[in-house]
Image (cartoon, rainbow, N blue to C red):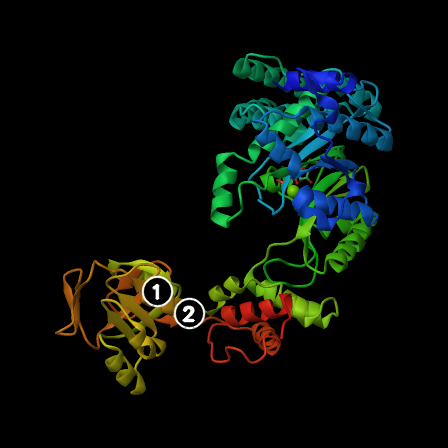
């Protein structure tokens, strides 16, 4: 199919008609953008990775040259019945020529081969969901050229064996394990611990074994035509948009299936060229604590995924200062520049090829809620952003986890579960049970901690609910009155707990064969739905000073509305709406 598409594309360059259709006026859309033609605002078209590669290129940051095949191309691929459209193949070759011009290398050329990576990148980051292939363009001949050119035979064959592994996995779906077993055997035979210890001749033998696996599994030889390798790799990335992993991720995160992924084709830089080369990942601030210092890891003499794959233990980024001081200071400068430019903490990927630093990715980094609050407040104090920008940097839902009490872990281990209902509103609560809102209120006024137990709640119960530590209902589901109201009030709720038999007349319930009467202690966990037959100590969340400062800004911004609302997530959401749509 791919071959046919390539041939078709070739044909289309020279003839005006194909199968009676005037192909010269079929589709003239631009499907491909060189990195210097894009920018960060073009995320929908170029995907997050592509848009940021373009932005970095335009900022003058060293980014290996390349181009992005747009999400529209991916959509067209699916519209055309999962066939690579000829116009896109055509545009790929035109763009590739431009990259050849920039790098002075030629794709598929034996003497001076250009190698590329083929990288997926959707509008929103979907970490680890889709695929990337490195070293595309290597074959039995170009590997020799690469070896001669660099004077580094080991490196050339190491790159080739990696390419065969990745291509086989991503494009042909051959089990990774099959290749890893061959590598492990070779290491065992040598008594080597790491694959960096394998030399060129050992790698050549490994490659022969890899090619055998490939032909056994696919009944064809490992493709030697660079063009075919490239188009198959790009097609595989388009296809990976619809792999079950990616579909599940989209379902969980509410990402529409018709967005498609962009594909980035980028000239390779090599972190596996020896002791002055390496690859790493870093954040401009600590994503767990928010502390303002570069946080990251790198591996010497390694390529791409080695850092995350845990093949060898990476070194903290500060070690780079000793190993390659110039690279380190350049790295710090660029990291700071990126953070100032994006006005947010950046998560970056970089590679060093023989002492020369390249950036391969940047994006706003994921973070814990604690660090999100600290960073937002710090950045305002540093003058990097204003308060309005700061409050947009925290996801309201994230605040929930900060506020809910949890059970003391030692006590929880000893506790007995008497029933299980639906985890309707997060948090943990312990208190004496009461069966009407009036009783709950009266005992609360006398200083007791109370849990309201009802068949179902209704709007008349609101007052009783508000003063309760938690709500337990026998009926109702996640959208029942109790569940919705508890989430709004910000207290924990276990709903639909039909394991318990409630007796409203005697004000008691039976659970796990035991009767619990008014005033008895129980504990409920709104995150799991568990109901425990006795008291369990709860631990209040620690609310740091950053949280307070942050919320006071949010409250100032959202002005007077919903002053009485207890839930910080709702207060923050209201403030964000005010910033995004400053009305009235
Ligand atoms: P993911 O989205 O899973 O991070 P990437 O496309 O970012 O996948 O690539 C995987 C790894 O390969 C990253 O470490 C990246 O830095 C590296 N990589 C990608 N393209 C190149 C390239 N042209 N040269 C060197 N390394 C690359
Ligand atoms: Mg990446």
Across and down, in percent, residue 568 comes to 51, 72
Res 203 label: none
Element type where label 1 sits in the image = helix
Choose top left, top right, bottom left or bottom right for residue 576: bottom right
Looking at the image, residue 560 sits to the left or right of residue 378; the answer is left
Residue 12, above or below 423:
above
Instruction: Determine whether, in the image, residue 248 is placed left or right of residue 116.
Output: left
* Residue marked by disc 2: 488
Residue displayed at 78% across by 17% down: 14
Horizontally, residue 407 falls left or right of residue 455, namely right
- SS at mark 2? helix
Q: Is residue 144 above or below residue 377?
A: above
- What is the spatial separation of the Cα atoms under label 2 and label 1, in whole angstroms? 9 Å
Residue visible at 51% across and 26% down in the picture: 175
Q: Give the vertical position of 185 relative to 420 (above or below).
A: above
Report the residue at 54% width, 27% height from top: 176
The x and y percentages for residue 205 are 64, 16
Q: Nearest the camera: 158 or 333? A: 333
Residue 483 got which mark? 1
Q: Residue at image x 36%, y 77%? A: 466
Residue that sits furthest to the bottom in the current view = 446
């Amino acid at each position: 199919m791919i071959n046919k598409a390539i041939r078709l594309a070739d044909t289309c360059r020279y003839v005006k008609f194909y199968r009676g259709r005037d192909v010269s006026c079929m589709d003239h859309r631009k499907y491909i953008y060189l990195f210097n033609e894009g920018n960060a605002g073009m995320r929908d078209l170029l995907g997050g990775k592509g848009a940021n590669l373009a932005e970095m290129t335009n900022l003058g940051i060293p980014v290996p040259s390349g181009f992005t095949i747009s999400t529209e191309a991916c959509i067209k691929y699916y519209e055309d019945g999962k066939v690579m459209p000829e116009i896109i193949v055509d545009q790929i070759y035109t763009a590739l020529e431009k990259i050849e011009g920039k790098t002075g290398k030629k794709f598929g050329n034996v003497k001076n081969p250009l190698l590329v990576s083929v990288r997926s990148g959707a509008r929103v980051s979907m970490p680890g969901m889709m695929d990337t292939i490195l070293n595309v363009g290597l074959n039995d001949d170009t590997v020799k050229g690469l070896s001669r050119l660099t004077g580094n035979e080991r490196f050339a064959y190491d790159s080739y064996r990696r390419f065969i592994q990745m291509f086989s996995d991503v494009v042909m779906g051959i089990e990774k394990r099959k290749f890893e077993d061959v590598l492990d055997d070779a290491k065992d035979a040598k008594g080597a611990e790491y694959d960096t210890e394998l030399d060129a001749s050992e790698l050549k033998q490994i490659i022969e074994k890899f090619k055998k696996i490939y032909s056994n599994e696919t009944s064809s030889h490992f493709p030697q035509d660079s063009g075919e390798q490239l188009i198959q790799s790009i097609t595989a990335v388009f296809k990976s948009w619809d792999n079950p992993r990616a579909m599940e991720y989209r379902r969980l995160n509410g990402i529409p299936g018709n967005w498609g992924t962009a594909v980035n084709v980028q000239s390779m830089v090599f972190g596996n060229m020896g002791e002055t080369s390496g690859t790493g990942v870093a954040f401009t601030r600590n994503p767990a604590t928010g502390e303002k210092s570069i946080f990251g890891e790198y591996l010497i003499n390694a390529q791409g995924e080695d850092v995350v794959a845990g093949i060898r233990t990476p070194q903290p980024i500060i070690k780079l200062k000793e190993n390659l001081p110039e690279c380190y200071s350049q790295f710090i400068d660029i990291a700071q520049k990126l953070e100032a430019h994006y006005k947010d903490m950046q998560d970056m990927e970089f590679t060093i090829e023989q002492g020369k630093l390249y950036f391969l990715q940047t994006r706003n980094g994921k973070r814990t809620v604690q660090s999100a609050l600290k960073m937002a407040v710090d950045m305002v104090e540093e003058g990097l952003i204003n308060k309005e920008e700061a409050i947009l940097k925290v996801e309201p839902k994230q605040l929930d986890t900060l506020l809910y009490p949890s059970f003391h872990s030692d006590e929880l281990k000893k506790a007995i579960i008497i029933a299980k209902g639906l985890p309707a509103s997060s948090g943990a609560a312990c208190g004496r049970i009461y069966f009407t809102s009036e009783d709950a209120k009266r005992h609360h006024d006398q200083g007791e901690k109370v849990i309201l137990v009802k068949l179902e709640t209704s709007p008349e119960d609101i007052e009783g609910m508000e003063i309760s530590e938690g709500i337990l209902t026998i009926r109702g589901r996640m959208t029942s009155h109790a569940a919705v109201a508890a989430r709004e009030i910000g207290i924990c709720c276990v709903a639909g707990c039909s394991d318990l038999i409630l007796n409203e007349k005697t004000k008691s319930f039976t659970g796990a064969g035991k009767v619990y009467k008014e005033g008895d202690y129980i504990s409920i966990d709104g995150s799991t739905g568990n109901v425990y037959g006795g008291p369990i100590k709860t631990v209040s969340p620690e609310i740091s000073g950053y949280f307070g400062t942050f919320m006071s800004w949010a409250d100032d911004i959202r002005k007077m509305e919903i002053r009485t609302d207890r839930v910080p997530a709702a207060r923050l959401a209201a403030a964000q709406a005010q910033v995004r749509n400053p009305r009235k």
